[in-house]
Image (cartoon, rainbow, N blue to C red):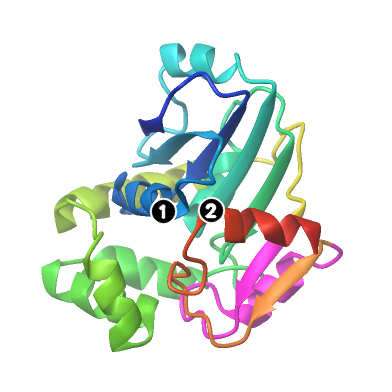
Amino acid sequence: MKTSWIRKEGAEELLLFFNGWGMDARIGVHLFGESLPELTHDLLVCHDYRTLEPEPKVMEEISRYNHITIVAWSFGVWVAQHTTLPPVTQAIAINGTLYPVNAAKGISPEVFQATLSTWSEENRHRFNRRMCGSSEVLGLFSSMSPDRTAADQQEELALLKEHVQASGTTSAAWSYDHAIIGGRDLVFPAQQQYLAWKGVPQTVISDMPHFPFLHFRTLQEVIACLKT
């Protein structure tokens, strides 16, 4: 796992953003910029899940915080629960589940395997259009799209498949407090998310695609859902 400090100023609270598969720190940088000046947290972005653990030095730095909030998007929702972390205060999931490769509660195994097997530069563009759902959202995503090659992303996805297959039930000492679900999510379909988060408070945005950061422009807007 790669980590990128976007803000590290000795704040009392840390916001840990687990990005989706294939991403880098750029979405976190964008969200941080949009969230100023009201954001008081330090901010660490996690991405590139070829391994599931941050570096030991980063773990030591994270452990110094008294209050940790997790915001996890897409495949990052599952990764966060399978990463060894210090005590988590609160956590919110966006357009992802704890069953990422699952016909009933996540991405169907057939779709996942087809994505992995056929991933290429051309198919990456198709996937991004599907992820965004409209030209407006795609334009926003393109302004912060990751500096990653298709081969690089494919390797990460293959290793994520291995991680999921090798994992048992998570032993995480924390649970998600809230799930945000996009009604137009074509990656983690809304019906699968409803089932996966049964019993967990939910915010449903009927016209939101898989990429949620046109509808949620700041980190404060995301965290505010914990109070609803």
Please tell me which residue lies in front, 66 or 180: 66
Q: Give the amino acid at mark 1.
A: Leu
The crowding category of the residue bearing disc 2, from other C-alpha atoms within 10 Å (few below 14, some 14 to 19, many at least 20), is many
Determine whether the residue tagged by mark 1 lies in a helix, strand or loop.
helix
Q: Is residue 40 left or right of residue 104?
A: left
Q: Which residue is mark 1?
A: 31
Question: First in sequence: mark 2 or mark 1?
Answer: 1
Are the residues flagged by discs 2 and 1 in contact, CB closer than 8 Å?
yes
Report the span colored magenta: 179-199
Residue 11 percent location from the top left of the image: 56, 24
Residue 68 percent location from the top left of the image: 65, 32
Please tell me which residue lies in front, 77 or 225: 225
Q: Give the amino acid at mark 2.
A: Leu
Residue 108 percent location from the top left of the image: 52, 73
Q: Report the residue that reaches farthest toward the front.
A: 37
Q: Which residue is mark 2?
A: 219
Mark 2–mark 1 Cα distance, whole angstroms, equals 6 Å
Q: Residue at x 37, y 50 (%)?
A: 33
Does the image show residue 165?
no
Q: Residue at x 72, y 25 (%)?
A: 87
The crowding category of the residue bearing disc 1, from other C-alpha atoms within 10 Å (few below 14, some 14 to 19, many at least 20), is some
